[in-house]
Amino acid sequence: MQLEISGISKQYSASVWGLRDFSLAVQSGILGLLGPNGAGKSTLMRIIASVTRPTRGQVKWNDQDASRSPDSLRSVLGYLPQDFGVYPHLNAVEFLEYLAAVKGLDAQSARRRIDELLMLVNLAGARKRPLGGYSGGMKQRIGIAQALLNDPQLLIADEPTAGLDPEERVRFRNLLTELAGDRIVILSTHIVSDVEAVATDIAIVANGTLVTHAAPEDLLRSVQDKLWEWMIPSAELTAIRQRFNISFIARRPDGVQVRAISESQPVPAAIKATPNLEDAYLASLLAHRAGAAA
């Protein structure tokens, strides 16, 4: 299976573009979509899910144009949007039964699938409670369950761990890893650690354009010799922030440990550090902004 995004642009007004000439090919596995707020991630996901039509360009699912034949993609799609709403007077079972009927599942299969999913998202004990009484994290979990109702081949999740506590986030990441073997999962989030834990590929988006698309290991190698760390007194922190691209700060008993992204050694005391995905993400954004400014 393959999802191909070719030259997608989305124009909202004469001077406002959500996406510009965005192209990306995605195959089985988990694609982590990273980018600042307003980068165009949600716009891209709505276009892939055929909720929004692009101004230009094409989305193909297994070589079929999803804009012209959206049902071919919608029948195998699971979608959790960022702003997921519920019917507050329905309980979890009633809500999922309603959505299962909308997706065309027969009643017997739907009941069996709903029982499985409520166990999976740890809501079996709250299955008869009205959704209006759910916490934000519980509503997010019911959103995850509805996205999985039809056992989708393409799963799109926009900020799925927002509102989840650390234990729930780990459970959801484990679930994504289990799901990813024979389907495409697109995970959009601002939590880099979630992407680092599960993604087989990463796409970084900024200003509606694709900055880079690579495996996590390749992103880490790209910043391997550009990361430095050293200790400074607390009083120097403000000045250091102004001089260097700081990616990490930690208070220590003997001062402040700082980590900076730099092509060369920033100060004599700095030593090379081992990068993590957040360092690679920030380095990619800095390089993009420098190129745009130039």
Image: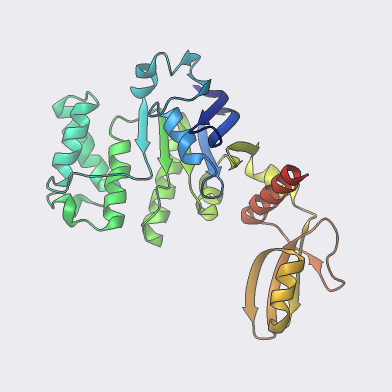
Residue lying at the far front of the rendered structure = 14
Q: In the image shown, does 188 or 28 lie closer to the viewer?
A: 188
Q: Position of residue 141 (x, y in %)?
A: 30, 49
Q: Position of residue 26 (x, y in %)?
A: 55, 28
Horizontal placement of 117 versus 245: left or right?
A: left
Is residue 68 visible in the rendered image? The answer is yes
Q: In the image shown, does 242 or 191 lie closer to the viewer?
A: 242
Identified at 50% across, 40% down, the residue is: 41
Horizontal placement of 43 versus 123: left or right?
A: right
Identified at 13% across, 45% down, the residue is: 90
Q: Position of residue 50 (x, y in %)?
A: 40, 26
Horizontal placement of 249 versus 239: left or right?
A: left
Q: In the image shown, does 124 or 32 lie closer to the viewer?
A: 32
Residue 135: image quadrant is bottom left
Identified at 23% across, 35% down, the residue is: 113
Q: Is residue 175 above or below residue 55?
A: below
Q: Is residue 62 above or below residue 135?
A: above
Q: Quadrant of the C terminus?
A: top right
Residue 179: image quadrant is top left
Q: In the image shown, does 186 or 85 lie closer to the viewer?
A: 85
